[in-house]
Image (cartoon, helix red, strand yellow):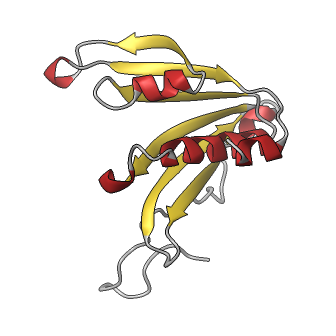
Amino acid sequence: MDERPDHPGDHAPRHPRPRPSKHRTRKPLRHNASDDETPFSIRLTDDSGVLLGGITGWTWGGCGGITSLWLESEQRGQGLGSRLLIAAEDEIRRRGCDRAVVATMSFQAPGFYRRHGYQEVGRTPDMPDGTAKHHFYKRLSAVDPADSVNS
């Protein structure tokens, strides 16, 4: 399927998938687990299908990463962010990964990730307006998927 618009007036999709090149300029030295980068996206909708939030990320070489977690402001504080994060961790595990990483700004959600067992492994200081970027890591254990549903 071509991700480009058919006509000049059409709009491109919001999140086009990267398309692999048909031509390689050189052969890889060897095949390994780090050749498996794959994005994921999980949407949270209400009963009528209205988007309330979502989480995006990737898996690669046995590791999963959270790129973005977003909720409508009216939906915050109800545990929905936790549900999205748990769903993302379950997807990361399902893909055979045993660790996850995420970065967040100091004014966003460092406490949220700490509460979910992420350990801060680094900090980039001197970001705009005196903020910092916090880098987190979590070792994921194998869990029964039923445990995540009840959390």
Q: How many marks?
A: 0
Give above or below for 69 relative to 137.
below
| Residue 72 visible within the image | no
Corner quadrant of residue 107: top left
Give above or below for 49 relative to 98.
below
Q: Residue furthest left?
A: 129
Q: Position of residue 49 (x, y in %)?
A: 50, 75
Give the side of residue 20 with respect to residue 44, left or right.
Answer: right
Give above or below for 109 relative to 46.
above
Give the side of residue 68 with respect to residue 106, left or right.
Answer: right
Residue at the image position 49 percent from the left and 64 percent from the top: 16
Corner quadrant of residue 32: top right
| Residue 116 visible within the image | yes
Looking at the rendered image, the quarter that the C terminus falls into is: top right
Corner quadrant of residue 131: top left
- In the image, 83 versus 37, the foreground residue is 83
Q: Position of residue 144 (x, y in %)?
A: 85, 40
Looking at the rendered image, the quarter that the N terminus falls into is: bottom right
Residue at the image position 14 percent from the left and 23 percent from the top: 129
Q: Position of residue 103 (x, y in %)?
A: 45, 27
Q: Position of residue 127 (x, y in %)?
A: 23, 20
Residue at the image position 49 percent from the left and 79 percent from the top: 48
Give above or below for 94 relative to 129.
below
Give the side of residue 9 with respect to residue 22, left or right.
Answer: left
- In the image, 56 versus 29, the foreground residue is 56
